Image (tube, helix red, strand yellow):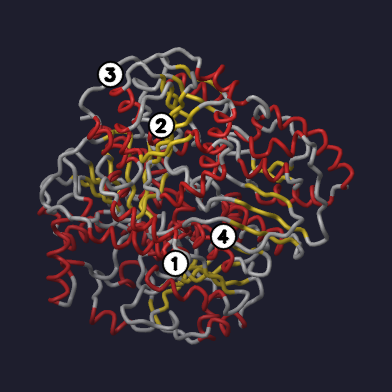
Amino acid sequence: MTRKIGIVGYDLFGTGGTTRSNTNLINEFLADNKEIIYFNLLPFSSLKVKKIKKLFINPDKIQFYQLKDFSESQEADTYIITRESLFVFAKIIKEKFPQVKVIGEVHTPLSLIDPETDFAPDAIDTYRVATEKIKQTLKDKFKDNNIVVFPVSIRHLANKVQNKDVSLKKINSEVNFLVYSRFDESQKDIAYSIKLMDYLVHRAGKNHYKLYINGTGTGEILYKNLIELYHLSENVFLNHKVPEYGIYLSTARYETLGYSIIEAFIDGRPIVLYKGDDNSLKDIYRDFKSFCWLEKNIIKDAQEIIHYVNENYSEKLHLFKHDIPLVEDLSPLEDYGKKYEETILSAPLVNKQRFEGKADNLYQMIYDQNNLSKDTFALKIYLRLKEMRVIGPIVSSVKTKEMLKRLMRKTEATPTSDILLKGNLRDDFVFVESFHGKSFAGDPKYLAIALKKNFPEYTFYVSSVNELVDMEIYSYGMIPVRLGGKQYVTKFRKSKLVILNGNSLDKAGKVEGQIFLETWHGVPLKKMVADLVDFRQRETEVSAFIPRMKKWNYLITSSPRNLKLFESAFQLEKNKQLKILKSGAPRNAFLIKNKDNTALKNKLLGKYFNYNFELGKKYILYCPTWRKQKRDAISQLDFIKVLNQLPNEYELIVKLHPLESELINYYNNLDPRIHCFFNEISDIQELYLIADILITDYSSAMFDFAHVDKKIIILQEDALDYENSIGWYFDLEKLTGLIGQSYTEEELACEIKNHNEKLYNQKILQNLLSWDAIDTEKNIIKQLMIRWNS
């Protein structure tokens, strides 16, 4: 009797490694005379079925169902679920067929799986995993289940390997690197490949090195920005025709095999690989001698690549020939279906439990875990449009997808601000709202880093507006969530602790038992909220602000005067539950610890200049306050004239306000000695450590900068107008000794070169930042844990 195998997947008709794995798996079973019933989560058309059947060796033995129509299907002997977010479907299978075996295939690196994903260990009998390390991790969690190490099939490559139709391509005089990947920074880290290319081209002088990046996904916007930032338009190309000769490059954070890696190897391409954050690729390909291994250290990796490129071809060929037979060690090239059956399908039945009457709830969980709506009408329309020749490329574009997501976010309901929501909070979830997702910086960042160090098992979600911010968040091992999106609201409402330096989004609400820790973002000089000079503006801001302020549980302050200003501006007396933490600011604890840390300063120079910098430079940091009126430049001064009157070692870093970020290209193209970084990847505390001098106007940057005890210049070109429209809390000169004034280019250059005793720094620390301390984070966490555990 022919054995029937049910396979459950997200979208067999899409692209990517799991789709390739499922296609191979189906063919392996068809070759072994099995029948296949395939269940697809996403809707599909008869046209798609007709197209995909051409990929199968015996298409008459496969049936296709949408997952929601499972109840209409016949019983299979075994079911294989090929996506972790679908594992919960095993309970629906067991509801109908409690005696069948269910296999869960773990394809996603464990670090990337949502911690709330239900692995359904009470319904899945056997988990198939890629490595011993993954097996051990799951074994610690699921002690009663079978966990089997078995590779994915590489059937589509078998003929070339068996026929020895494999030869190593040479590296031409124009050295090409090729990246084939989904544009997903959470896993792929293609951004690092671009940074590496910047160093190779501009620092190591390898102008003949070219990088071709091919794929699709939201990361495309990030890659375009980085190509522009690093001036790589002649060296890095997105979705261009790939040259015949080229080196395969992967800098992915995680992989469980990497189909594109083995495909490139079989195609005869030299391979350059990052070992993986979990060392998984180094484990999988440990015996391959022809690979060049990276460490994610720009300087070392560049040297390794240059050495690899210059290596003699005959030596490369010798190592390549050594590696070819090792391909069969990665995955069986013959009788894969039989071996899969012997190794996995023959494992004993573990769960015979029948799940009764839960199908509707389980389907809803599946839709939620896969960010889908139960009503698939709109999705069907979208997928049908994607298939159309003219409209398809438009609706599939990143811009269209982002626009649709923004529209969906705007249409979601906002809860009444003064009503606490009911929900299930998780003590091990922390939500970080930093500058409303425009950058990962300030107190929320430094407090989150300290918490992660103390509680590495916790999951940290961080608000983000785009892929540039995502890149910074990933570098700290945290998870970005798009501001205002479905995942944002879901994770926000699950997190016991929420850290903010502004107000929370109204649509996120507040769940009963949640802790809101407000840090604000600086000691104010200019008046705010209830203290504004303009009556109408004051009334508007107060009415919007107070209900949000009442959600706060804790407020961090840096001095008695700082607290007094907050009490006045925010009308804190209206929040009876609020507890004031007289602990100082975590962002300034970072400065106190590191103000004399030369090694960290050089590391930060490496971050911002991508290691393309000269030691001995003196950096002037200019960060002016935002103006409501649109302007073409942030100062009336000609900074090129200023720099021309200074010694060559002086250079200017312009820190734009996020609302004026469109000026970045203007300043980056103004002069080689003027630098402007994307706000999304800039942290002003880090820039303080790099800078030798600060120039600002009305920004609280002048106060934080006092912690590094360097020169401050107050450049105020519109002081009278600003005072009349906004107003000051105190006389800057009397309280701090700083004097604001307007300068000509000559006067400013002269002031930059002048040395003074910087007595204003001590005055600032005494009068405005007296509670800031080196152990600020430790003290805050100690006080938080009292409330956390209550």
Mark 4–mark 3 CB contact (< 8 Å): no
Query: Which residue lies under the disc numbered 4?
Result: 608
**Left or right, 497 with reference to 84:** left
Residue 474 x %, y % = 48, 47
Q: Amino acid at mark 3?
A: Arg
- Report how far apart the C-alphas of labels 4 and 3 lie in the structure: 57 Å
Name the residue: 41% across, 24% down.
Answer: 76
Residue 146 lies, with reference to residue 205, above or below; the image says above
Mark 2–mark 4 CB contact (< 8 Å): no
Q: Amino acid at mark 4?
A: Tyr
Mark 2 or mark 4, which has the lower sequence index? Answer: 2
Q: Amino acid at mark 1?
A: Ile
Residue in front for this viewpoint, 131 or 104: 104
Residue in front for this viewpoint, 65 or 651: 65
Mark 1 or mark 3, which has the lower sequence index? Answer: 3
Can the viewer see residue 138? Answer: yes
Which of label 3 and label 2 is nearer to you? 3
Residue 745 x %, y % = 52, 85
**Left or right, 631 with reference to 618:** left
Which of label 1 and label 4 is nearer to you? 1
Residue 117 x %, y % = 36, 34
Circle 2 packing at 10 Å, graded few (<14), some (14-19), many (20+), is few
Mark 3 or mark 2, which has the lower sequence index? Answer: 3
